[in-house]
């Protein structure tokens, strides 16, 4: 049974007022104030700030004394020169090695690379020391007003650029040697003053311009054919060397069959000092096929040419001049220089007695225009009018313009020695890449 709670009435609850009299004893704040604790804490805080500031100033002073060496202005100028010249020379060395790797199929000539690097460092050091504005030498030419000093520095800089754009002239023609069955020829020419723009194939992968001033490289595609022999006769008569980019199965058939005239024609080209390049087995567009098909298009022709010549060309011209970046990369991996042209005679289009002179007109107008007189000329030794009329007219035109002594091969356009125009098969030559 639950117990019942007893309720209290309001009258039974007594009310009391709160105590507002305050503490009867001293508080902690009062005790701390009486003992001076607040004043001691304030003095201690001020002393700590003062000690911290003094320590920081002392540290800064020590850092300043230890980091700044008292170098003379001349010493600083020499150190600046070393820094800049070495940095630029390393860039020069890197580009030189890349160029050697691009051109030299066999090997990189390291002694020559290091010699050029040393020469470049001397030139860069001299230019930086002379032209770099420095407090130790604010004037490049003494006793002249300061306002003309920047103009003088710019004039010296651009003059040095102009002079450096013309390398030494190669040896004069005269003696000739035979290497790998190809007569080696030298031409008394020099690099084009705009050689940096001419060698744009370093960036887009395809050579389209001859880098030799005043030189013309005559090239013939799609052969050999029944007119090739007549073209070789004319080139021999005029004493001109040319480049032939051959097919394996285009206008001619069974290029390596000794019962046909083609192997003898190819050996005649080689022995006469002309350059032989690869143009694909069947003249298919190299950008329209996959890597495996492209490999067979090139490799099958390599096998045929090795059977005939005993070596393999290292220069390749894609049919129709079409080779996208994947194509160019594969060809570079296979050891080829990819070659285009910058003067197309279109002899395949103007191939009749009534129209062949239009090809000659295109050659003359382009050969003497603002682009200069050094070109890669495209013709076809499978065209009858090219062999009978166009080539003799072009050779006569070159002679009239005093360019007949500067007809070169494509390899000569790169200053690439004849021993680099061909190579022997590698160990993985028969390997079929996936």
Image (spheres, rainbow, N blue to C red):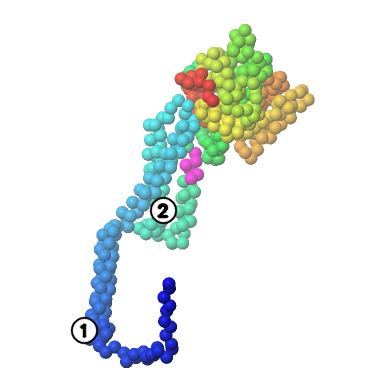
Q: Which quadrant of the view contains residue 371?
A: top right
The residue to which callout 2 is attached is: 132
Specify whether residue 60 is painted magenta. Answer: no
Q: Which residue occupies 71% across, 25% down?
A: 348
Does the magenta-highlighted stretch encompass residue 165?
yes
Q: Counting residues from the N terminus, which is met first, the one under dot 2 or under dot 1?
A: 1
Kindly identify the residue that appears in the image at 33 percent across and 55 percent down.
76
In this view, which residue lies farthest toward the right?
Answer: 354
Q: CA distance from mark 2 to mark 1?
A: 72 Å
Mark drawn on residue 95: none
Tell me what residue is drawn at x 43 percent, y 87 percent: 9
Q: How many marks?
A: 2
**Over which residues does the magenta segment extend?**
161-166
Q: Position of residue 320 (x, y in %)?
A: 66, 29
Q: Quadrant of the C terminus?
A: top right
To which quarter of the image does residue 124 belong? top left
Residue holding disc 1:
35
- Quarter location, residue 86: top left
Furthest residue to the front? 1
Q: Secondary structure at mark 2?
A: loop
Depth check: give the residue in front, 173 or 216.
216
Picture layout, residue 230 above or below residue 133: above
User: What main secondary structure does the magenta stretch of the protein show?
Assistant: helix
Image height of 7 relative to 207, above or below:
below
For the point 63% across and 33% down, the residue is 342
**Tag 1, which secondary structure?**
loop
Is 228 positioned to the left or the right of 63 in the image?
right
């Amino acid at each position: 049974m639950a117990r019942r709670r007893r309720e209290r009435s309001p009258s039974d609850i007594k009310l009391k007022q709160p105590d507002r009299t305050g503490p009867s004893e001293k508080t902690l704040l009062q005790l701390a104030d009486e003992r001076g604790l607040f004043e001691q804490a304030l003095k201690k805080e001020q002393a700590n700030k003062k000690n911290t500031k003094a320590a920081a100033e002392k540290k800064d002073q020590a850092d300043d004394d230890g980091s700044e060496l008292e170098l003379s202005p001349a010493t600083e100028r020499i150190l600046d020169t070393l820094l800049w010249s070495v940095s630029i020379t390393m860039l020069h060395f890197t580009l030189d090695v890349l160029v050697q790797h691009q051109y030299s199929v066999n090997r990189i000539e390291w002694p020559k690379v290091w010699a050029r690097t040393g020469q470049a460092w001397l030139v860069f050091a001299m230019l930086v020391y002379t032209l770099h504005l420095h407090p130790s030498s604010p004037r490049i030419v003494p006793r002249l007003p300061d306002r003309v000093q920047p103009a003088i520095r710019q004039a010296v800089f651009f003059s040095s650029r102009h002079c450096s754009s013309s390398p030494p002239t190669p040896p004069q023609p005269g003696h000739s040697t035979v290497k790998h069955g190809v007569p080696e020829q030298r031409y008394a020419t020099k690099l084009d003053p705009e050689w940096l723009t001419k060698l744009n194939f370093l960036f887009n992968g395809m050579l389209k311009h001859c880098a030799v001033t005043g030189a013309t490289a005559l090239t013939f595609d799609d052969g050999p054919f029944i007119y090739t022999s007549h073209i070789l006769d004319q080139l021999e008569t005029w004493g001109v060397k040319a480049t032939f980019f051959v097919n394996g199965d285009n206008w001619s058939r069974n290029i390596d069959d000794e019962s046909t005239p083609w192997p003898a024609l190819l050996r005649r080209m080689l022995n006469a000092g002309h350059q032989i390049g690869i143009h694909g087995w069947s003249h298919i567009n190299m950008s329209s096929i996959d890597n495996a098909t492209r490999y067979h298009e090139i490799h099958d022709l390599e096998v045929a040419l090795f059977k005939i010549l005993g070596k393999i060309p290292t220069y390749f011209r894609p049919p129709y001049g079409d080779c996208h970046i994947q194509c160019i990369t594969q060809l570079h991996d296979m050891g080829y220089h990819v070659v285009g042209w910058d003067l197309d005679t279109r002899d395949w289009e103007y191939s009749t007695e009534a129209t062949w002179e239009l090809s000659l007109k295109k050659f003359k107008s382009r050969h003497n225009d603002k682009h200069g007189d050094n070109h890669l000329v495209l013709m076809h030794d499978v065209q009858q009018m090219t062999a009978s009329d166009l080539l003799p007219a072009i050779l006569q035109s070159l002679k009239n313009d005093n360019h007949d002594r500067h007809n070169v091969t494509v390899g000569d356009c790169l200053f690439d020695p004849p021993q680099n125009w061909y190579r022997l098969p590698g160990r993985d030559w028969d390997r079929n890449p996936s």
